[in-house]
Image (cartoon, rainbow, N blue to C red):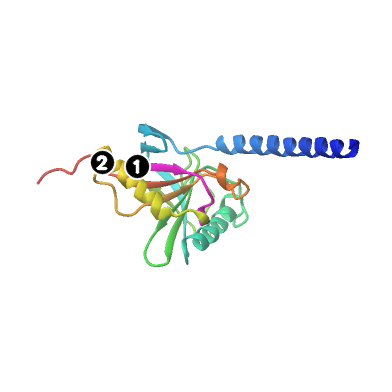
Amino acid sequence: MERKVKWLLGGGLAAGFVLAGGLRYLAKERATPEPPHLTVREEGPFAIRDYAAIWVAETVAYGDRRDAIRSGFRTLSDYIFGHSHDGDTIDMTVPVIEEADGEGRWRIRFVMPDGETPDTLPEPPPGVTLKQLPATRVGVVEFSGRPEEVNMGEQEARLRRWLHDVDTHDAADKPLYAFYSSPAVPGPMRRNEVWLPIPLEPPVAT
């Protein structure tokens, strides 16, 4: 009986240390810099945000969404961690952005740290391009889960319904997928988003 109690206590302590370590790791991830933005409206998991223009490192990958983001992530990680060039590493930011670009073709983007430009960033290797995304407004829905297990179409549909309910009817046809968590984070604790770009201003009548 005494041995069983000791075993249970030992197991409980070990689980507590694992949980505490996991929470510290998650807190560190939550502190990873994001691009500057203004939240215009927020309701539960939904939001409308305005983002300033940002620089990204972009690569193109092929296949289904899950295979593409793995491939693109490796290529871009080699760039920011200095494996594919001589020079300094680049601070990690979030999110990783994924966008469909035709049948089986995906654009994967790492957001560059605020204030960095091609003049201050290392020269990218073949297959990686530095580009500036213009200032934009996006509708957002946040959700957890591993990207390969989540039905992104269902999340996009949720977001479109909410945007319709708040009288925002001109969202873009093509979504962006934004991923904030590293592969080490358990699915229920992950932060993922679907973005739908929205025109910043109504079109000018002609």
Q: Is residue 12 above or below residue 153?
A: above
The numbered disc on residue 4 is none
Any part of residue 91 in sight: no
Q: How many labels does the image show?
A: 2
Residue 116 as seen in the image, left or right of residue 161: right
Q: What percent of the width, then of the height, locates residue 160?
A: 31, 47
Q: What residue type is labelled 2?
A: Thr
* Residue at far right of view: 2
Q: Check if mark 2's residue and mark 1's residue have beta carbons within 8 Å.
A: yes
Q: In this view, does 69 lie above or below 12?
A: below
Q: What percent of the width, then of the height, locates residue 73?
A: 54, 55
Q: Which amino acid does label 1 sit on?
A: Gly
Return the residue at label 1. Answer: 139
Q: Give the range drawn in magenta.
A: 138-148
How many C-alpha atoms fall within 10 Å of the one at disc 2: few (<14), some, or many (≥20)?
some
- Which one is nearer the viewer's eye here, 179 or 74? 179
Residue sitting at 63 percent across and 55 percent down?
83
How many C-alpha atoms fall within 10 Å of the one at disc 1: few (<14), some, or many (≥20)?
many
Q: What percent of the width, then of the height, locates residue 84?
A: 60, 57
Q: Which of the two discs, 2 and 1, labels the residue nearer the N terminus?
A: 1
Residue sitting at 72 percent across and 39 percent down?
18
- Quarter of the image containing the N terminus? top right
Return the residue at label 2. Answer: 168
Q: What percent of the width, then of the height, locates residue 168?
A: 25, 41
Residue 185 in which image quadrant: top right
Residue sitting at 27 percent across and 39 percent down?
165
- Which one is nearer the viewer's eye here, 118 or 27? 27
Residue 155 as seen in the image, left or right of residue 28: left
Of helix, strand and loop, which one carries label 1?
strand
Residue 82 as seen in the image, left or right of residue 9: left
